Amino acid sequence: MAVVTSTVPLSGTVEQAEVARRADAFVEELSQWLRIPSISADPGYHGDVARSAAWLEATLRRDGWPTVEVWSDTEALPAVYAHWPAADPDAPTVLVYGHHDVQPADLSDGWSFEPFHPRVVGEELRGRGASDDKGHIAMVLLGVRAHLAATGAAAPAVSLKLLVEGEEESGSAHLAELLAAHADALACDEIVVTDTGMVDREVPTVCTGMRGMVDLEVVFHGASVDLHSGQFGGAVPNPVTELATLVAAFHDDAGRVAVPGFYDDVREPTAREREAWAALPFDEPAWLAGSAAGATATAGEAGWSTYERLWARPTAEVNGLHGGYAGPGHKTIVPHRASLKMTFRLVADQDPARIKALVERFVSERIPAGIDAEVSTGGPGVPPLICDLDSDLVASIREAMGIALGAEVLPAREGGSGPEALLSTELRAPLAFLGVMLPGDRIHAPDERAVLPLLLAGAEAVAHLWRLQGERAR
Ligand SMILES: [Zn+2]
């Protein structure tokens, strides 16, 4: 299987050559792993999550990692841990985090092939998990092999630890427990997260932040049953109208979230970041038609670009609003109930607990007479994470990716939310990202793919990174 007809410029480094030598075996190996449907969301597949962990364990052992363990001593689905100490006891310890579970996938979801029968099409490897995140974990393993081969050393230039979680795609519900139970094994100086990507194939970027999240659920109850809209309409409160009024109150005319205090702690992006983001090419019509699946206009908070809105501004988003009759014909009722689900994305320095309190107060002040309300903001929420752009780690990652991809690597962020802040806080170590997913990789969607030349360049970047971090520490 000769797949590496690359349009990524080749760096000509020893690391690049070592990655290239292993390319075909890498595709073969990753394809094996992708055949295991490690879907964490569905208990019917938990045996496969365990098989996937065992597959990774065996692969790490074959690679020579001195310590390899599968952790299943907590409520968490099996996680894989590995440790490869540097020869130099003073070298820093870098923990790489990723996950081996995948999103559910079924042919009937609209896949053009069986999602767990991976295939190479041109320069792409297609299959569930090809990119998110098995492809990226395999990329790190390949990077470690290339690093050792390039340096001719028996151990990496930094002490490496690997934590590959088994339930990230179901919300990392037991990650805190896992981190606490294995705090000693996981102790590290720096964390690198693989579960990330770049804004565009032609524009290498490094993710430097992710948003946090808080949930809100509201149910408005009126009468105990639906009422006749002729006999009662206009004389009793309508829960759907009242809930729609509440929803409308969440934004002002400039698209800002109208919850008092909501923006108090928001850390604005620096001028340097805004400049870098403005320099990223952004083809709005193409983005709308492609990534945004046929949306026809952008919208949001006035005064900010699309990237800024996605990466550096908090939001209040209605996920669902339900009430009354929407079937065929008409049904003349005053509905007795309406329900709402919202999520708030948070940015650097916003505290989920404080935002929850502000949102709860905002809602409780807007419950009209005659309406009984149930208001809930769910669990603790997800804190946002922001990297230190001036850290050695981010500098090394940009340099390593720059060598492998042959271009300057600009800072960018992601709009989503993940367990990064939890990792960084619990392990008390700074965190940065290294990944080469593309917006077109269709992660979580049918026909997921990875662009193989990019995965190989990512592996090369990983190989450079350990060398660079080892050199910086000396
Ligand atoms: Zn992922």
Image (cartoon, rainbow, N blue to C red):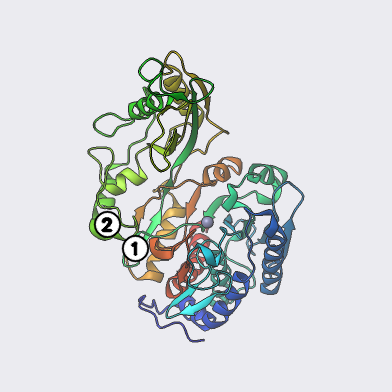
Q: Secondary structure at mark 1?
A: loop
x 43%, y 24%: residue: 228
Which marked residue is nearer to the observer: mark 2 or mark 1? 1
The residue drawn where x is 28% and y is 56% is: 288
Q: Would you say the beta carbon of the disc 1 residue lies within 8 angstroms of ligand 1?
A: no
Marker disc for residue 200: 1
Which label was assigned to residue 462?
none
Amino acid type assigned to the residue bearing label 1 in the image: Asp
Q: Are marks 2 and 1 in contact (CB under 8 Å)?
A: yes
Q: Which residue is mark 2?
A: 280
- Give the percent coordinates (x, y) of residue 157: 57, 65
Q: Quadrant of residue 405?
A: bottom left
Name which residue type carries label 2: Leu
Q: Where does residue 226 sit, x and y in percent of width and height?
A: 48, 26
- The Cα atoms of the two marked residues, 2 and 1, are separated by 9 Å
How many numbered discs, if any? 2
Between residues 258 and 323, which one lies in front from this camera angle?
323
Residue extending farthest to the bottom is: 2
Q: Is residue 457 above or below residue 166?
A: below
The mark nearer the N terminus, 2 or 1, is 1
Callout 1 environment at 10 Å: few (<14), some (14 to 19), or many (20+)? Answer: some
Of 339 and 167, nearer the camera is 339
